[in-house]
Structure formats: structure tokens, C-alpha cells
Amino acid sequence: MKINNLLSASTLTVIVLTTMIACNNHPKEDKAVLIDPTNLDTTVTPQSNFFMYVNGGWIKKYPIPASESAWGSFKEIEENNHKILKDVLEAAAADTKAETGSNTRKVGDFYATGIDSVKLNSDGIKPLAAEFEKINGIKDMQGVMEAIARFQRSFLSPLYTFYADQDQMNSSKVVSYLYQGGVSMPDKDYYLKDDAAMQKIREEYVKHIEKMFVFCGDKPEVAKANAEKVMHIETELARSQRSRVDLRDPYKNYNKKSIAQLTNETGIDWKSQLATIGVPNTDSIIVGQPEFLVTAGELLKKVSVDDWKTYLRWKLIVAAAPYLSDPIVNENFHFFETVLNGTKELKPRWKRSLQTIDRLMGEALGEVYIQKAFAGDAKQRVLDMVNNMQGVFRDRIKALQWMGDSTKQQAVVKLDKFMKKIGYPDKMRDYSKLDIGRDSYAMNVMHASEFEFNRMIAKIGKPVDKTEWGMSPPTVNAYYNPSLNEIVFPAGILQPPFYDPGADDAMNYGAMGAIIGHEMTHGFDDQGRQYDAEGNLKNWWTSDDAVKFKDVAGKIVSQFDQYTILDSIHINGALTQGENIADLGGVRIAYEAFKKTKEGQSTEKIDGFTPDQRFFIAWAQAWRVSRRPESAKQRIITDPHSPGMWRCNGPLSNMPEFYAAFNVKPGDKMYRDDKDRVVIW
Ligand SMILES: [Zn+2]
């Protein structure tokens, strides 16, 4: 996996965008209320549960909205960003004089199709008619294979996932990858885990597929049989998938194969698959999980042409469902949001459309967003903060007790080579060749997806464009990308309460500083440490230091294995270790950088809190979130990030500076014996 998101689990080729913002409690004009005493829960002591002490009052005040599976600091910022973008989109849609082919015209037309409920509902399934006809016309396995490849170009990836990206072993080249895929539920566990909750979800899933086939025109009894066929194919694919923990090993998931060899091993004609996908002639490809493609090849022999046609119809309808008529949207929402995440209500139409456009044309929207929410000297001020943090990180590496000198030198070389992207790209994406109209929302989504796909495969064999961004400017998130050895902070996250030009240093370093430190530390977590300064998978560690890293990282794994949510579900310490290492490094580096500021060296209280206390409160505020139990259960399986409470409390339980600030003593729940505390970076 390429990108370590701060917030959401990233899928392989599509970054799940959760857009925008700002906190009503922090009016920019007036003096900001940075620590609102009503957000605290003083019935909980800071020594027993710091997260609840800082956020308990806020959690009670702001119940999760019916249309959300969770609510927290990221969502608050997103909400404000949404308001800004809604105005932009409404103005664009109403601007009848906007020049044909301009970004304004395109986002306006896109939005108009997304909110036109009358047309969406009268069209029903019609926008997919031509595609269904093509599937119905398939006569043999050659036709099936052609469709599987052709759909990779659109917004669905049947059977496997194809993408192009930098070569992990040679970051100056863009190459083709094949990755496991083909299923529609969030993880293989949903197909295979033998407990009552998962069995119930599987029953609901089959019922859901059946209903969707009825929307496609199947008779109820045919739809029922078809749903079982789809479930069979997806279960077989899930069976041969690797677990999320196994996917964390970059070497095991990098298998270069010649096209001839891969064809021989899988029985799939990859030369013609890649030609239909549109990949320029190539003699090799990187395969993530070879055994998965072997299973896919076997399944192609076992399953009939008719059943594959059924599977393809399913993959089409499940991908397009959010962009069709209300009954289809509602049924899709029922399974994927209500059953899987506990969400009660569909988001309003404008918000769903806005999120789709941000995901597919984010840099067109971003231009206006930046003018409204990230003006003036914001970029330089954040860059100054990033540079301070980098200096502190460098000193910390040099002072590490567990690492030897030669590895330290290499680590500093890597750190100094970080590319830093802040706010927005210098050059926004060119959408002039993208065809967007007012005919059909679903077609617009398909065109925009294919446009992105073409942009991606056009990079194969060309020099790497290091200026590209993987998130849109309004995104409330950040990432480290090991292949470019870069840290990226979109304007969307550089907002109060994470970053506020009017706030004191304790508040900015405790929140945004720690987030910057988090992304920097990803360059040195269990995955990131395996890439060198040039972005290549290449060992730069002495074997002794590599053993020591695994030893300290193992302690973090066991610390988080001990934490439980909903009384009995354990956090997966192995799955979350990269994020936990990044959180721990982030807050330490930010604390040390903060201590170099004037406020960091003072003891003067503000609003009744010392500078150190304010720093840790800002950290806890950044992670405030409440989540529905269904969503929490899903995240434990799929999300490499620990739940908010443990992202907050886990790292602090390793910091004596936190103990000192809040008088944490042996016997307190936040306390850990000296010998059990971990320092990695
Ligand atoms: Zn992260």
C-alpha cells in the first residue's frame, strides 16, 4: 500500500476522500476559545482516562448525527469545508454563462446532475442500459475476459485490481501492478469468519444482492439464485486473499513476473488483458499476491460464462448504485452504511454530490477553496513549523539509544531528503479533456473515473511527475508517500482546531505539530523504514539495528494488543503498528519542538492550564471522536489506525512528560512502569 493516511484507511488505487471543516467554537475573527471548559468531563480524572477527561463533555454535547457513522474533530472541520464548497458548486451550477469546457462549467454541470432528483428518479437504471446490453451480449469466456479488462478502466475492478504506480524497487519509473480484489464487502473476514455477527451480515448481504438484481430487471426467484452465485464467486476470491497484516510486508507483496510466466502460472491471457486495459506493450508486471491470481485463473475455468455475466452485472450495479435513483441509492445505503456501519440516515443529496465531485475533480474545486480558506502567508508559516519539527527529529535520531551510528547516518540522509507539500499543488490538474455534461450523473462519474484511469496509465514508461498530489486541497487528511519520500498536508487539514494562526504554540504544536510529526515518522515505521531516501525498497539498516527496531516495535504491538473496545474486541496490534509508531513519534517530536518555543519555556498559565497541559489537551482534542458500535467493529478489522481514544491515550502512557504535566502516579490507569515505556523515534 502506497499511502499512509492519517485518518482513513486508504484503498489501493482510490484514496477515500473525506472532505472538509471548521469548528464553530473557533471563530477566526475574535479571540479563539481554544479550550472550551464545557468540552471537558471533570468527573473523569486526567490520570485515569485522559481522552475522556478532555473530550467527555464534547462527546455528550455533540451526539453523532443520524447521517454519520462517527463524529469528531476531523468531521467538524470537514463540515465547514463542505459549506464553503457547497457555495462554490451552487454558484457554478447556476452560472449559465460559464465558458464551455471550463472547470466552472464542468463542476457546475456535474453538481447539477447529482442534485436533480427528478431526473435521477425518472432515469432509474437507464444510465447503465448500454453496459448491461454489452454484458448480456457476451457469448463465451473470451467475452467475459474482455469485459473484466474493459471494466478496469471504469469505476469497478472485477476479479482483480490493476493500477500503475512508481516501481517500488526503482522509484524513477512508473510500472503496472496487479493486486488482489474482486470482492465487495470490506474484508475477507466478512466472507469467512465463523461467528454469529458475520453470519448475520452475510445473510443480509445476499438479500441485498438479490434486491439489487430485482432493480436490474431480474424476476425475484432468478434474483435470489443470482445472489447466491455472486456470493459463491466472491467467497472463493476472499478465501485466497491475504490478510491485512500480510499485506503490510512490502517485499512479500512485490513479485515481478514476465507476462509469459504469469500467463503460464494463472492460465489467464495477460497479454490481451493488458492490451484491453490500455497498457502500452510491456514484458513484465509487478504482482502483489501471485497465489490470488492463480485462484482467479482456476475460478475462471470452473465457473460458467452465464455466472460470470451475473457477477459482472453485480459489479456494475454495486459500483454505480450511489449515482442512480433513490430506491437503488437507499438499498445500497441500507447494506453498506446501516448494516455495516450503523448509520441511520442518508446524507443530504448536495453533500453526497459534493463528496463525489471532490473525489473525482478535487483540484478543480480546490482552486476556489484555497482562496477562501488558505490565503496569505499560511503556506510559509506551516512550512516553518515543518522545518522546526524536522530539525528536532534529526536531533532525536542522533541521540537514539537503541540505534548504531551507521544506521543513524542513513536515517538522517532519508529525513533530510523529505519532499514537503503544503496546502495545494503549484500546478493544478488539467481537466480539459474530461467530458462532463448535464445528461446523466452516473455517466459523469464513469467519464471522470475513466479520465483518471487514462491519466494514470499514461504515466507508464514516462519520467515520474514529483509535483502530483494524492489528495485534493480541501481534504482533511495528510499522508506520507514512501516512493516519493514526501510528506503532504492539504489546506483542508490546516484549519482550526488543528492549526490556527491566532492560537498559542501549545495548541498548534499539540495538534498540527503532532500530525506533522506523525507523517514524518511514517518514513520510519515498520513499512516506511524499508524504503530509502530515494523512495526505493532497499535495506539501509545494519542487521543488528533492524533486530533492535523489530524488538521495540514489538513492544508497541503488544501494548495495543492489550487494548479493547466495546468491552471485548481487541485492537490488532500488528495491523495498527505503523500508525501507532507514527502517533508515538509524532507527539514526542512535536513536544520537543514546542519546548523550544517561548511558550514552551514558560510556566505561565492560560485559561488555568500550564503550557505543557495545553499541549497535551490539544493532542487529545485532535483525536476526539465518537463512533457507532457497528462502525467501530468494522474499523477494528479494516483500519490500520487505532480508535481515537487509544490514539490519544496509548502514546501518552509512554511519556514521562505527560505524567509530570498531569501528576500521573504509579497505580493510575494512564501510568506504565518505566521498563514498559517505549521510545522508538
Ligand atoms: Zn498515519
Image: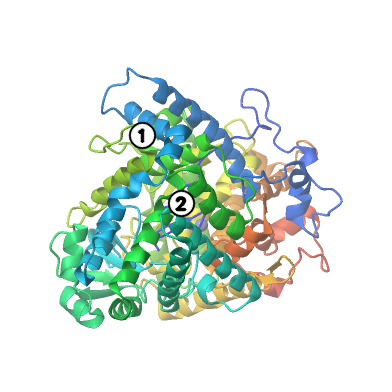
The outermost residue toward the right is 43
Query: Does any portion of residue 96 appear in the rendered image?
Result: yes
- Which residue is pictured at 22% across the width and 37% down the height? 433
Q: Nearer the viewer, residue 212 or 66?
A: 212
The residue identified by callout 2 is 16
Q: Element at badge 2? A: loop
- Which residue is pictured at 63% across the width and 64% down the height? 633
Q: Nearer the viewer, residue 30 or 626?
A: 626
Q: 503 left or right of 307?
A: right
In the rendered view, tell whether residue 212 sits above or below residue 231: above
Q: 572 left or right of 490?
A: right
Disc 2 crowd rating (10 Å Cα; few below 14, some 14-19, many 20+) is some
Q: Nearer the viewer, residue 460 or 550?
A: 460
Q: Quadrant of residue 317?
A: bottom left
The residue identified by callout 1 is 364
In the rendered view, tell whether residue 22 sits above or below residue 445: above
Picture mark count: 2
Counting from the top left corner in percent of width and height, residue 573 is at 59, 71
Q: CA distance from mark 1 to mark 2?
A: 18 Å
Kind of residue indicated by mark 1? Ala
Counting from the top left corner in percent of width and height, residue 346 is at 58, 44
Q: 55 left or right of 130?
A: right
Quadrant into which the N terminus falls: bottom left
Q: Nearer the viewer, residue 423 or 269?
A: 269
Query: Does any portion of residue 468 appear in the rendered image?
Result: no
In the rendered view, tell whether residue 317 sits above or below residue 293: above
